[in-house]
């Protein structure tokens, strides 16, 4: 399969003072394929945000290359089509909302690229519909909750019809309700065929993805499906990460009841396992 | 806790852009009370007035109507010694980049203590102490440039800058948003220790119910510009009706326990930590075992 985004030996460093540079990304290579749902995790300062900024050319590598649909992100002439293919939703909803009315905010990017009026209206309608914010279209965004604002921001990116959306800690300022709303939208867009890349500190959120990439010291240290990754509890703890709290609970229970599976990463699975275990015990 | 009131807020109201078409009521008769050495969490949805409320603690906002008394000082008076007040009440904003302005980390954290006119040696010690509290290595990080920091590191620097002022009251707006699990745990442990050992009064705004459950002595729930509910984390998180009514989230562990009670399992939802919750579930699983034996005996 043709990749959407391909990183080849990407290295990047920040200059921290006159003499010293800190290398943040070290020779990273991986590909993201159409339709994937990928979570990138790593502790603070591991390089994951810098990495996510390389995915659509917000930053370009010091050495190595990033290819988006075969275009090099260093190619200034391709910048617009690269950004259109890979959109980003940032951490603070307030920082990415520009208009005073929800639907105008969603239309902002489309106006910039000169989409005809009829087409624009259609795309705004569709985008608001996907994020379930249609009934708020005439409202001023500053009275919305954090989760609602973030969904407006997503609609703005969605209206540009990208192939891939990068969520850079997009839920970290939200409460559990807001987070759930945004996660549902991410899942829904992925089911519609959109490629999703999410950078997160919430392990229960990473468990929703199909693939997890773990970054440490600017390098990829693990890459695989959540179920595989979360089997490595100790390694993750050494990387200053953890497994989801339901996995932790399952492990505690497994220690006493060995037939209770510890291979659990999602809440629904955990509940099912309790039910299954409970029934089996009643049966004996 | 000493029983001495340190924050007393009564019937506080605030309207932004009053008298314009953009008029917006942010606070409407809000109340909050904290004793010296208490740790208070404020939760509530965006726009419920949390941030407006905490900006009254150090005089960034002055009471429009209602009462704000901090450590015995009435802030509705015309003349308030803001310098002393702000030394006493340290406020860490939600967006750490808002309050970092020096080029180097060490200088940024030293800025406040320098302004207090402290001797260089004392400033250096305070910077070292504050960096240690937030988990930044003094030697390694003090000469790093602030702009090249990650979001989580910036948050630590901002907090260290406030701690270096040695405030009596520490006010935090979403202290751990954007921190990785280990940094989050370490920071919470340190705040808890400052609170318990050094009797630092802590007020924090949070949407993370795990940290509310772990840290707070008391919780205020805000909605529509006022306090609608207050109680210990246990009282708040075990009142299912109120949780639903005010749309308050619960820690992930408690969420699981509630789902199990919905399915008819008799688990106690007062278990917040992973171990407590797991033990609670094991009781039911083990209990059933005994129960089924009982059935067999009959």
Image (cartoon, coloured by chain):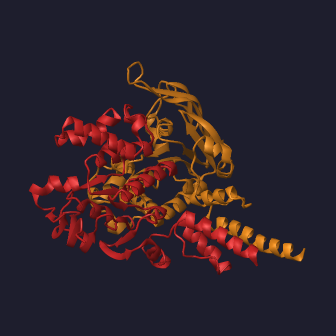
Residue B274 visible: yes
In the picture, measured across the screen, residue A274 lies left or right of residue B168, that is right
Farthest right residue?
B298
Occupied quadrant, residue A183: bottom left
Q: Which residue lies furthest to the top in this view?
A: B19
Left or right: where does residue A3 sit relative to residue A259?
left
In which quadrant will I find the C terminus of chain A?
Answer: bottom right
When the figure is inspected, residue A56 is found, relative to residue A227, above or below; the finding is above
Using the rendered image of the protein, determine whether residue B160 is visible from the camera's viewpoint: no
Total count of labels: 0
Residue B164: x percent and y percent? Answer: 43, 53
| Position of residue B155 in the picture relative to residue B14 (left or right) | left
**Image point (75%, 73%), residue name:** A282
In front here: B89 or A72? A72
Looking at this view, is A156 or A144 the one in front? A156
* The chain coloured orange in the image: B
Using the image as rendered, state which of residue B183 and residue A62 is in the foreground: A62
Quarter placement of the N terminus of chain A: bottom left
Query: Toward which corner of the image does residue B71 lie, by quadrant?
Result: top right
- Shown in red, the chain is A
Q: Where is residue A258 in the image (x, y as percent from the top left)?
A: 65, 81
Q: Position of residue A170 (x, y in %)?
A: 38, 53
Location of residue A119 in the rendering, given as x and y in whole percent from the top left corner: 23, 40
Q: Which residue is drawn at 45% across and 69% down?
A: A241
């Amino acid at each position: 399969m043709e990749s959407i985004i391909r990183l080849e030996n990407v290295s990047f460093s920040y200059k921290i003072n006159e003499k010293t540079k800190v290398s943040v990304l070290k020779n990273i290579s991986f590909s993201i394929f159409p339709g994937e749902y990928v979570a990138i995790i790593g502790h603070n300062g591991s390089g994951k945000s810098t990495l996510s900024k390389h995915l659509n050319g917000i930053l370009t590598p010091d050495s190595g290359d990033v290819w988006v649909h075969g275009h090099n992100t260093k190619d200034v002439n391709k910048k617009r089509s690269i950004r259109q293919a890979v959109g980003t939703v940032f951490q603070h909803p307030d920082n990415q909302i520009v208009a005073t009315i929800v639907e105008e905010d969603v239309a902002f990017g489309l106006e910039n690229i000169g989409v005809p009026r009829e087409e624009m209206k259609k795309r705004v309608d569709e985008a608001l519909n996907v994020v379930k914010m249609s009934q708020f279209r005439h409202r001023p965004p500053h009275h919305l909750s954090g989760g609602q604002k973030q969904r407006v921001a997503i609609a703005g990116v969605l209206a540009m019809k990208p192939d891939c959306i990068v969520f850079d800690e997009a839920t970290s300022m939200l409460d559990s309700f807001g987070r759930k709303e945004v996660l549902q939208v991410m899942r829904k867009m992925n089911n519609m065929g959109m490629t999703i890349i999410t950078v997160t500190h919430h392990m229960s959120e990473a468990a929703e993805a199909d693939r997890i990439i773990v970054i440490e010291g600017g390098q990829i240290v693990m890459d695989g499906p959540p179920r595989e990754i979360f089997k490595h509890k100790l390694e993750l703890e050494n990387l200053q990460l953890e497994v989801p709290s339901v996995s932790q609970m399952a492990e505690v229970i497994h220690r006493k009841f060995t037939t209770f599976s510890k291979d659990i990463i999602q809440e629904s699975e955990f509940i099912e396992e309790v039910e299954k275990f409970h029934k089996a015990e009643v049966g004996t | 806790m000493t029983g001495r009131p340190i924050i007393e807020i009564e019937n506080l109201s605030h309207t932004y852009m009053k008298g314009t078409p953009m008029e917006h009521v942010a606070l409407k008769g809000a109340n909050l009370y904290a004793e010296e050495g208490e740790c208070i969490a404020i939760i509530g949805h965006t726009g419920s007035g949390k941030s407006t409320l905490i900006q009254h603690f150090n005089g960034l906002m002055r009471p429009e109507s209602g009462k704000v008394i901090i450590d015995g000082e009435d802030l509705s008076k015309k003349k308030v010694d803001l310098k002393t007040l702000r030394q006493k009440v340290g406020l860490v904003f939600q967006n750490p980049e808002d309050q970092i302005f020096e080029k180097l980390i060490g200088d940024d954290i030293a800025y406040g203590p320098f302004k207090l006119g402290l001797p260089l040696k004392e400033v250096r010690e305070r910077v070292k102490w504050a960096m240690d509290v937030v988990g930044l290595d003094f030697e390694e990080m003090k000469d790093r440039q602030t702009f090249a920091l990650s979001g989580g590191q910036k948050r630590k620097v901002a907090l260290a800058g406030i701690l270096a002022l040695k405030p009596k009251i520490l006010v935090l707006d979403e202290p751990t948003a954007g921190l990785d699990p280990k940094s989050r745990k370490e920071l919470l442990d340190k705040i808890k220790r400052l609170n318990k050992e050094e009797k630092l009064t802590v007020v924090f705004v949070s949407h993370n119910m795990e940290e509310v459950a772990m840290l707070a002595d008391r919780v205020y729930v805000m909605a529509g510009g006022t306090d609608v509910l207050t109680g210990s984390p246990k009282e708040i998180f075990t009142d299912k009706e109120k949780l639903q009514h005010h749309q308050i989230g619960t820690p992930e562990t408690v969420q699981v326990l509630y789902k199990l009670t919905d399915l008819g399992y008799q688990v106690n939802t007062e278990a917040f930590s992973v171990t407590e919750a797991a033990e609670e579930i094991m009781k039911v699983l083990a209990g059933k075992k005994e129960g089924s034996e009982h059935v067999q005996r009959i």
